[in-house]
Image (spheres, rainbow, N blue to C red):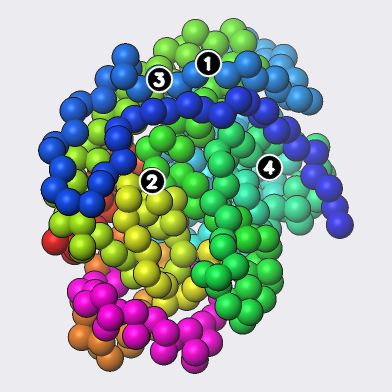
Amino acid sequence: MFKPSKVVLISSMVLLWLLAAQCNGAQPTPPPVSPETVTTTQPEATVKELKAIPLAAGEKLKIVATSNIIGDMVRQVAGDNVELVILFPLGVDAHGYVPTPQDTVAVSQAHLILVNGLHYEEFLDKLLQNAGGQTQLVELSTGVEPRVLVESEHDEHAAEEESEHHHDGSDPHAWLTAVNALVYVQNIKLALTTLDPAQATVYETNAANYNKQLQELETWINTQIATIPPEKRRLVTDHDALGYYADHYKLTVIGAVIPGYSSMAEPSAQEMVALQEAIKSYNVKAIFVGTTVNPNLSKQVSQDMSVQLISLYTESLGAAGSGAETYLDYMRYNTTAIVQGLK
């Protein structure tokens, strides 16, 4: 198989001690998070194979980001100092994405491609090969502890589907917590300052400002989740996209219409029966469906079980006017929808 030239940012684990875990029972409103109480340990990071780009006067770094979520983070750190191309249009499901000839050209001309990693971009090897295989690459999930699917959570059929879509048991949706977003931003900053040291101060200042907003977002999410009665903190989703969110914010995913990390997998009849039994057993009132996923199966389950469907933005930001145009807005939108749906 083609082995793309890629850069891995090896960093120490980002130590973020934010808020005490929500215990069973009513909890007081958590205090605001500040840079003094929540800090990202300065990583003693090394950047292997990543090389500075000799830019001409007025020339900007050419960056390709796979997802529009990553693209928004890049904009927050880089501002107008890079030329940014985003591969996934708004509303597109990355799990089934097929690169265009224009994507190949953009990658071939880029100084750097920023990807999620964790096998999220299933098309990546072929795209890089078609583009010449020379583009420097950074996986932004490097430094995040991957969420690995426990065997008991997934039957043989679902495991086969997961293997078919190359996630190898690791959940790729790592960006769905504000603390993991801090890791992504750190990796973006390290990459940009290495490639374009002349603009290092700008990148570092922008990243620091954005980190404060992410820390504030983390406090806000915990405050909102604390308003949900503990016995109601259970989720049913369209596919396993909210695992990091649920684990970190002390929710429980009791089932998914498509029990796998890829929305392209298909559930078995036994899995559908098990999901319906779980919905009934836990008195679930809603199924949370991503805007990029075909909702037909979820609609059928909602009709059969008399539960409502609630839309979330998981794989993509929203269009103008959606309330989910940026990563910060996207996380607030989803949290508000989850809290309202579970109360």
Pointer 1 with pointer 4, Cβ within 8 A: no
Pointer 2 with pointer 3, Cβ within 8 A: no
Name the amino acid type tagged 1: Gln
At mark 1, the secondary structure is loop
Q: Which residues are magenta?
A: 263-290
Name the amino acid type tagged 2: His
Q: CA distance from mark 1 to mark 4?
A: 31 Å
**Which residue is label 1 attached to?**
42
Disc nearer the start of the sequence (1/2):
1
Asked if residue 342 lies in the magenta stretch, the reply is: no
Name the amino acid type tagged 4: Val
Compared across the picture, whether 75 is left or right of 222 comes to right
- For the residue pair 297 and 61, the one nearer the viewer reads as 297
- For the residue pair 65 and 262, the one nearer the viewer reads as 262
Can residue 317 be seen from the camera position used here? no
**Which residue is label 2 attached to?**
248
**Which residue is label 3 attached to?**
39
